[in-house]
Image (spheres, rainbow, N blue to C red):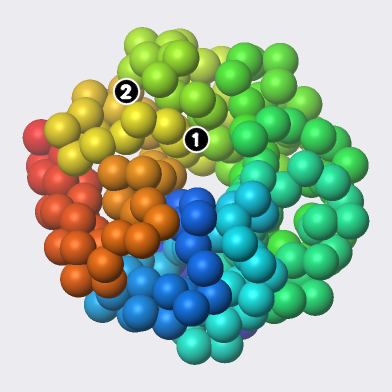
Amino acid sequence: MKPIQKFALQFQALPLVAILRGLSPQEAPAIGSALTQAGFGLIEVPLNSPQPLQSIALLAQAHPGVLVGAGTVLTTAQVREVHAAGGQLIVSPNFDGDVVREAVGLGMVCLPGIATPTEAFAALVAGAHGLKLFPAEAASPAVLKAMLAVLPAGTLVVPVGGITPGNMAAWRAAGAHGFGLGSALYRSGKSAEAVRQDAATFVAAYHGALLA
């Protein structure tokens, strides 16, 4: 299955991206299992984590049905390193056209970070599969709603930054298609069981937001 097909499948099932900043290769197997047991199929390991490429390789090998990749990807060289490690997802805090084009050219799914309509349109022209609204704390559901009103129909926008089970409904109501979940889901040293419990809470909150 191509990465974009895997992304579409997993995003439709549960559009929540687990952001595992600070994950070590030693933690990766247990944390990966905890997340997949809770239903997560989208996992990113930011490149400013310890030995991130090793963690990505371990997660990709252990969970072939999950779309695994990297966050905080800033250069085309990093895109190639993630690809070589078995990663299929490239997420950035910013929009860089070269990074997007490199990822797309390698058949990877790319979600660059944007904060303005100008960045959003430029990212789509470069070939981005979706947009990461970052940092969401600096925006608001109202900002997202206004942005979606002018973006091409069907554009996927995923708020990241400060997302909690308690504020997902407001973002969903504004049109958010999914969410990136960081420190509220995982932080370095957090036990796999605690991650599993919080992952289940996020899943329940997401489904509750759909019904709200």
The answer to whether residue 3 of the structure is visible from this angle is: no
191 or 5, which lies in front? 191
Position of residue 6 relative to residue 16, above or below, is below
Amino acid type, label 1 = Val
Position of residue 30 relative to residue 99, above or below, is below
The numbered dot on residue 174 is 2
Quadrant containing the C terminus is: top left
The answer to whether residue 119 of the structure is visible from this angle is: yes
Q: Residue placed at 36% from the left, 61% from the top?
A: 189
Return the x and y of residue 191 as percentages of the image width and height. 26, 67
Q: Is residue 212 left or right of residue 194?
A: left
Mark 2 or mark 1, which has the lower sequence index? 1
Amino acid type, label 2 = Ala
Q: Secondary structure at mark 2?
A: helix
Read off the residue under disc 1. 157
Q: Is residue 112 left or right of residue 159?
A: right
Density class for disc 2 (Cα within 10 Å; few <14, some 14-19, many ≥20) is: some
